[in-house]
């Protein structure tokens, strides 16, 4: 690994370094300030859904501790913070009245960030649909897309000139497939065909929201955040290669093609029961809106084997505490791949909006020696630099996550933070990786001056 200065020098001077979080994972205050339940409140309170039987009722108590958390971001020397809005905090039933107390929370957060010169990157939907909308069918109901657009319009009108960017959705692949296909995530539906219809409504809601926000001439950049991976065939057999191509089509291209080409990928469509996949004639035009940025979240690759039992990757660099293969090279290959595929189709500048590692961190005295996380970060930074050198327009990187937090169906058992959270006292303790990141960003900035 190159030392910090050499690594830092590989990034262009205007490159943005930040951290990311999401509302349900950190805010807590689930029943305070007029907030109504979301599908994640319902899901996490359903027995058997969360590994450690926990929920986000309190989480990191960020709702009350946001000022302290913003101090941490500032002390880390970071330029940017990516957070999401709890829709049911600002609009409890997902349609109808705005909850001013909820709006004020985000106003205070954005102001605190501005005071520290930290760019605010807002995500409108990080999986927490107001429960009231779920009662009406949730994302399976086409009408939800209209409600989402109205919500986006309101957030843009109120905050659009104080934000660096607004993303419509975070990882719609997860909402569709884990929320409605496998049922591992809220709302816990298990219906593969419904999951496809949901993905279409999510894309439709994205297009409608971009239109509604665009109409207001705000200064915030507008985009979407997609989770992506390379799909690598385990062998060069025809079967593995075909399965890998299909996997790439149904995950990466399934979202990229509608947005940048105005249609779904043929390869994926071929396997779909079209009688249960309803697309209105004008939908694709609505979805294909010009974007100011694309957010890419990268954690692992898809390793595709058609053998029984399937081959598994060699995992040369090991697995994270999530059991995910550490495969940094996939990040540069992915970025270079989508650049080549979509650069002439209006692909905007890219931000790496999430990348990070779960480690079974141990508190030793007042320290956490997470050398594995530092190694992970270095290796992934290196791959981003490689993609930039290959001509990909990448403008920033957000580490997931600022704090240890409620990791969805894994509860509090998986720690992704740069900062350790003692959930009993709510004390925040910097891990070695936080100290490392601060020093890295300092070196980057020294060079910039
Ligand atoms: C991503 C999610 C984020 C977090 C990380 C580990 O898929 O967007 O909320 O759970 O994974």
Image (cartoon, rainbow, N blue to C red):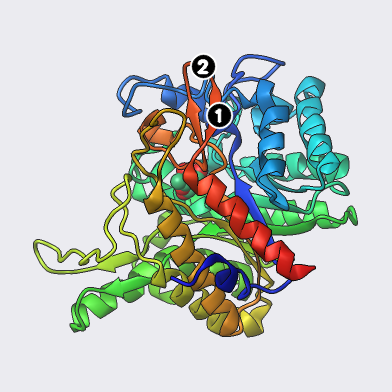
**Residue visible at 54% across and 78% down?**
387
User: Which type of secondary structure does the marked residue at label 2 adopt?
Assistant: loop
Location of residue 355 in the rendering, given as x and y in whole percent from the top left corner: 50, 55
Query: Which residue is label 2 attached to?
Result: 425
Q: How many marks?
A: 2
Label 1, ligand 1: CB separation under 8 Å: no
Badge 1 crowding class, 10 Å Cα cut-off, few under 14, some 14 to 19, many 20 or more, is some
| Residue 21 drawn above or below residue 27 | below
Nearer to us in this view, 394 or 285 = 394
SS for dot 1: strand
At 35% from the left edge and 50% from the top edge, which residue is drawn? 192
Residue 198 location in percent, x, y?
50, 48
Residue at coordinates 62% horizontally, 73% vertically from top-left? 260
| Residue 180 visible in the picture | yes
Residue 209 position in % (x across, y down): 73, 51
Q: Is residue 298 left or right of residue 308?
A: right
Q: Residues within 10 Å of mark 2 (few under 14, many from 20)?
A: few
Label 2 to label 1, Cα distance in Å?
9 Å
- Image quadrant assignment for residue 90: top right
Task: Classify mark 2 as within 8 Å of ligand 1 or not, answering yes or no.
Answer: no
Q: Which residue is mark 1?
A: 428
Q: Is residue 39 above or below residue 369?
A: above
Q: Is residue 93 visible?
A: no
Horizontal side of 96 relative to 377 (left or right) equals right
**Left or right side of 48 for 266:** right
Farthest left residue in view = 308
Q: Is residue 358 above or below residue 348?
A: above
- Residue sitting at x 59%, y 78%: 388
């Amino acid at each position: 690994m190159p030392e910090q200065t050499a690594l830092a020098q590989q990034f262009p001077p205007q490159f943005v370094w930040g951290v990311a979080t999401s509302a349900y994972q950190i805010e807590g205050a689930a029943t305070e300030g007029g907030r109504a339940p979301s599908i994640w409140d319902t899901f996490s309170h359903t027995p058997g859904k969360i590994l450690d039987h926990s929920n986000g009722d309190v989480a990191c108590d960020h709702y009350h501790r946001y000022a302290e958390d913003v101090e941490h971001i500032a002390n880390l020397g970071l330029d940017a913070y990516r957070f999401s809005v709890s829709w049911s905090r600002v609009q409890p039933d997902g349609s109808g009245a705005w909850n001013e107390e909820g709006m004020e929370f985000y106003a205070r957060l954005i102001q605190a960030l501005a005071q520290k010169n930290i760019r605010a990157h807002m995500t409108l939907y990080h999986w927490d649909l107001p429960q009231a909308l779920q009662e009406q069918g949730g994302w399976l109901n086409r009408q939800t897309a209209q409600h989402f657009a109205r919500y986006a319009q309101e957030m843009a009108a109120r905050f659009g000139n104080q934000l660096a960017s607004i993303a419509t959705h975070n990882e719609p692949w997860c909402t569709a497939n884990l929320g409605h296909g496998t049922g591992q995530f809220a709302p816990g539906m298990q219906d593969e065909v419904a999951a496809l219809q949901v993905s279409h409504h999510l894309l439709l809601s994205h297009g409608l929201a971009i239109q509604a926000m665009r109409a207001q001439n705000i200064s915030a950049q507008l985009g979407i955040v997609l989770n992506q991976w390379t799909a690598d065939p385990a062998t060069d057999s025809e079967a593995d290669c075909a399965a890998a191509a299909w996997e790439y089509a149904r995950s990466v291209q399934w979202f990229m093609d509608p947005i940048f080409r105005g249609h779904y990928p043929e390869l994926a469509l071929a396997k779909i029961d079209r009688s249960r996949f309803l697309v209105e004639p004008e939908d694709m035009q609505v979805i294909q809106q010009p974007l100011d940025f694309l957010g890419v979240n990268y954690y692992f690759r898809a390793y595709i084997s058609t053998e029984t039992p399937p081959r598994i990757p060699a995992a040369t660099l090991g697995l994270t505490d999530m059991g995910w293969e550490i495969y940094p090279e996939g990040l540069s290959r992915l970025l270079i791949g989508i650049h080549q595929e979509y650069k002439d189709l209006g692909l905007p500048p890219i931000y790496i909006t999430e990348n990070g590692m779960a480690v079974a961190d141990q508190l030793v005295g007042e320290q956490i020696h997470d050398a594995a996380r530092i190694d992970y970060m270095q290796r992934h930074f290196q791959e981003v630099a490689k993609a930039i050198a290959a001509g990909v327009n990448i403008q920033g990187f957000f580490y997931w996550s600022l704090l240890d937090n409620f990791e969805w169906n894994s509860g509090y058992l998986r720690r992704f933070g740069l900062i350790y959270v003692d959930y009993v006292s709510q004390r925040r303790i910097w891990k070695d990786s936080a100290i490392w990141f601060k020093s890295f960003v300092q070196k980057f900035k020294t060079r910039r001056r």
